Image: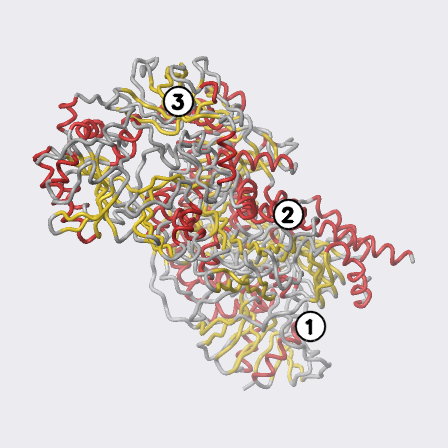
Amino acid sequence: MAVLLLADPGDDELTRQALTLAQSLGEVEVVGSAALPVARAHIPELPGAYAPGAWATALEEAIDRVSPSAVVAPGTNRGNEVLAHVAARRDLPFAANCTAAEGDVLTRVRWGGSLLEEARIHSSLPLLSVAPHVLPAVTGEGAPEVDAFTPALSDSDLAVQVAEHVEETVSGVSLAEARVVVSGGRGVGSADGFGILEELAGLLDAAVGCSRVVTSAGWRPHTDQVGQTGTKVSPDLYIACGISGATQHIAGCKGAKKILAINTDAEAPILASADYAVIGDLTEIVPAITAELRKARSQ
Amino acid sequence: MNDPSGATSSLPPAARAVVIGAGIVGNSLVHHLAELGWTDLVLLDKGPLPNPGGSTGHASNFIFPVDHSREMTALTADSSRQYEDLGVRIECGGIEVARTEERMEELRRRMSSAASWGVDDVAIVTPAEIKELVPYIDESVIIGGFHTKSVSVVDSLRAGTLMRERAQEAGALTVAANTEVLGIDVEHGRVRRVRTTRGDVETEIVVIACGVWSPRLARMAGASIPLTPAVHQMIDIGPVPRFAGAKSAIEFPIVRDMDTNMYERQDGSGLEVGSYAHRPILHDPDEIPSVEEAALSPTEFPFTQDDFAEQMEHALELMPEIVGDESVGIKYAINGLLSLTPDGMPVLGETPEAGGLWAASAVWVKEGPGVGRALAQWMVEGEPEIELQSSDVARFHDCQKSVAHVKARASEHFNKTYGIVHPGEQWESDRPARLSPFYHQARDLGAVFYETAGWERPHWYESNAGLVEEYGVEGREAEWDSRWWSPVINAEHLAMRDRAAIFDLTAFCVFDVVGPGALDSVQRVAMRQMDVKHGKVVYTPVLAPRGGFRSDLTIMRLSDDHFRVVTGGAHGMADLKWFRDHATDAQVVDLTSSWCTLGLWGPRARDILAGTTSDDVSHEGFPFATFRTIEMGPLRVMASRISYVGDLGWELYVPIEEGARLWETVWEAGEPHGVLPAGIGVYGTTGRLEKCYRAFGFELDSEYDVVEAGMAWGKVKDEDFVGREAHVRHREQEPAALMCTLTVDDHTSSSGVKRYPLGGEPIQTRDGEPLVDARGRRSFVTSAGAGPSVGKHLLMSYLPAEHAREGNELAVLYMGERYPVTVAVAGSTPVFDPGNERVKAAGAVPA
Amino acid sequence: MRVLVCVKRVPLTGGRMVLTEDDQALETRHLGFTISPHEECGVEEAVRLVEQHGGEVTVLALGPPEAEEQIRDTLAIGADRGILVATDGGEWDPQATAAAIVAAVRAEEEFDLIVFGNESADSGNYQVGIRVAHALGRPVVTGLKGLSVEDGVARCEQEVPGGRDVYRVPLPAVVSVLEGINLPRYPSVPAKLRARSKPVETVSPERPGARLEKLRLVVPGGPGKQAEILGEGAGAAPAVVNVMRELGVA
């Protein structure tokens, strides 16, 4: 029996990571993308605006056509959402953010990845989404046999759909896409304390981030928050200043290639996730780095 | 060495001393050790610096200088000075407010303590005056307060850092943070090394200054530091509109809402509300999480909000403007850990279990720097300048070290943090612990038991209640004065003076010094000549190096190389350690639990004793200050003819298991002579006060010398002893003060109630001027109590030399009023039976 | 309007996850509890809506009896009443959770809006709100960073690359929100005290069998990284700049 993969057209990378897991379960057929290296692609004809109910109906029709052994989707907002709709409609269990599956036993992430759960899914049709940035992505273009279809949508399928898109221009460097993030935690001490971080970030063309403690205290807006419930970042270098390294925060920055921790505490949990560390008072160290950078550039 | 944060230091292979714990105490200690010349010090902490995650890191950091304890007040005063010198002290003032009349009375008593200990910037203030100082208080819920201008807030973390850095700059100290102690090795009874996650350090001195973790560290060395981590709740609310422009951390006085066991203090734009009112929440040192496991810091536990509900209401009542403001949110709330001990005092000094292992635990921020200095002096010079007997780790008896006992007493004590604690107040929990063999007989006679050193001791006997009328003893009108007191005590006293009384003295600590070096060992400790005939009992001061008192006790010489030391239960364990520390070629064996003691005193004592024995108990046959074994029927009894109550009699010692039979024997023989049981109320207070006998911990401590105590009789022995040099010098000097006994001339208060001072009150001139001696010490009442046979209420006090003259008219400040007193005796002449004829009575033994 | 917010009691974790001996749960001996961050914002959002439009905020938690503490916390920031769906302390799978919530909701007068957090902090199942909406036959919009109600229609905003997607759904509806939709208020002392006397009703349904059955929990990874210490204090700055050069970001 085939495995059905629901593609998220908005996120090719995570879709390809999900394909990796799907392939481990069997022959894969895809719903919603014709660009993946699989044998068969089911392409639903849907209205232009995203409507989760419509996508759920499309997926259900594909399920009926293929009778798969399992349905897999990337753990994106839409992937999780559509699978949850199908699960609700069919009263099936749905396991979100899996990292592996074998038979009816799967592994999934909890606490934003700080903990793993092994679980058994009691279902003739397991619905699984795949945790982002755990598995490698399947590369390569494919030329699947394309099976276009028009799902029979009801009014209720379209009751919820994007009615409007409001453009917003982000000023400065986007946190999610920055190559360097200079991030501050409780140790920064105050809203004003971020001045030295902003100065360093300016030199490095970096985004400024922060921990949840900082947003809760009102020192920075939530848009700057890196963490399980904030932005998940993946820069080349993440500089964590005065951040102890609560699991909530690590969940947001572990995608960084390298982490530099600046902390008074050489035993702070952040050091177990960091590649480099400077021990000491960030109010002395951060300006010193800024000065050193300026000096290096002037030479 | 030059590693300020100590995060990556490597440890030296050996050190003069290793201090574990970089909180306020450890930092202060290394600073003062370096000041006193020690080098090669190591300071370890398992947490990071500057805030390693202990109690210093979340302390509320305020200091109220006045405490009823002289020791705590002195440590706090020294600490305040040190914080000031370090530039980390903000004086904001503080007000302890009263909601009840009983509390106002307590605040007036606080005025006395402040005057006694020399804190003068205090005043009783009215609700309106409080409102002026703290405009956001609702003055209608209070009836007054106690204002101390010198209350301050300090930065204890900064202070610790500065002190640590000074020791580092002096080249005396290596700091190692993030270094956990894995073991403390003890060899032949002394510490040898500390094993850590960064290697071993050889050392002969280890100091445990790690607060709530201390018991765990002590256990590594087989020692005991009896404390329990307990929770103190606090919340931070803000931002407070009134504090919006705050230029410093605190601009308004701290308010202690004494009757609700709470405090409120400004903290920048916020208000911190803390409480000691909730149920006691105790933890185990082994259960404190690591830095990584803890959500905040290891000693900031999750807030348990149900425990705080009532406190919020109290805070709302007192400060509705701020606490009732809907825009002011609760931003931070923790259950902070602090250390509680079984008696509420710190745990300081060298442990009796392991030589070289020192405790510096259960210390709050307000006394931290002072404790550091005092301990450094103790370690380097052998004696602190501030008397620390109430904090000595060696004070605990074994029964006081169990976790169950510590928790029971800590629980009981916790809610008394701001409590009104009567000087005579008794513990309720974990009793009875130690029972003398006379316990059941005493209980059957209606004994009212007080506790000392775990022992249940009859304080008076209800069976003697009839004597109150017989002797016409007056009661005390004021409830406070009569609390923990009974007129039966005075009646027992008078009956003893007429007939004879027996006393249960089993709480004595008894230890033998035996071996070839026994004589030299006791000579080294005792001020008086101990090379006496076998069978002599000697009462002697034990001096500290600077010539003050370390103890006073009696020593019996049993043979050439066998001495028996008898001392009070309360201080006995510290004495035991002192003797052991100074014993050479001799063993010091604790026999406290082997011997029980029955005191028999009164004019009929000899008649009674003679009725039980055919041995010679005549004055000639059994002189004063001798002891010997006599046979009382089938019992062999060690009888010692001394007295602490001023009457003829003996202390009778038998093995504990024969105690019940001893009581019966004496009781039967005594009945025809009218013997009665009498309690410690007589033995410890009325009997001795009439005789002007001093008591260690009251009149006698290391801050006063033998000459001042009026006890420098006889010549100084030739043999060397601890404190001899200083003592000789003291004899050559004019004493700055002299111990005096005063009588209260008029007890009547302004409201017409007769009042009776209980001890601790200041002695002043009739105009209310404090008496200060040439060494800056204030005069205060060291002991107070009735002198039933002289018909006066007696006060003992050191008075400046110029005031120490008989007939001098002075005053005592008690509960806010001055009462006239007169010096009855300057020196040690007893007010009752000045010729000591009773004690040394030679009265014939009837045939 | 009548708003229901569903919340979950979760531990406030520190820097290290420690499991119970049977690997079935987090060791919470040293930990405090809270509700999931997204839900904190959900409560705040509901309270703001009711402050604006009038009505009542009800908060529902499915969890052990101790979860009443978390309900009281929400009552202290402005919710009006609570429903505790009490469990024996064990974890319920998403289907069982949704079914219990649906049963509790059906026992109530209809809610105009039911608010969930986008996913819980601990188990992160991403589905309970959708299941509840489906069972009640209501529209559901997830992952909101903006919400307003006008004339019986909820305007829902999602943050997407380049801007915001806007949905308009008629009430009654179900939404799930993300942290950042607002900055939740701190409770005041009077509000805390009021919360103590607000009504919390308890129901105790039977626990159905799990279809997504937790077998055990695992703390991932080995001993973690061994960070290279570049130095101490300001003196480490040159070493830091060297690292930046090596990474090509300086």
| Quadrant in which residue B683 is drawn | top left
> Which quarter shows the C terminus of chain B?
top left
| Quadrant in which residue A244 is drawn | bottom right
Which percent across, then down, holds residue B434? 26, 49
Report the disc number at residue B37.
Answer: 2
**Label 3: chain letter:** B
Using the image as rendered, state which of residue A150 and residue A259 is in the foreground.
A259
Is C157 left or right of A299, judged from the image as shown? left
Which residue is denoted by mark 3 in the rendering? B826
Callout 2 secondary element: loop
Amino acid beneath label 2: Gly
Amino acid beneath label 3: Ala
Q: Say whether disc 2 or disc 3 marks the residue closer to the N-terminus.
A: 2
Q: Residue at x 39, y 61 (%)?
A: C100
Q: Residue at x 46, y 80 (%)?
A: A124
Is A231 left or right of B844, judged from the image as shown? right
Which percent across, then down, holds residue B258? 42, 31
Which percent across, then down, holds residue B512? 33, 52
Q: CA distance from mark 1 to mark 2?
A: 67 Å
Report the disc number at residue A13.
Answer: 1
Q: Are marks 1 and 3 in contact (CB under 8 Å)?
A: no
Callout 3 secondary element: strand
Q: Residue at x 65, y 38 (%)?
A: B86
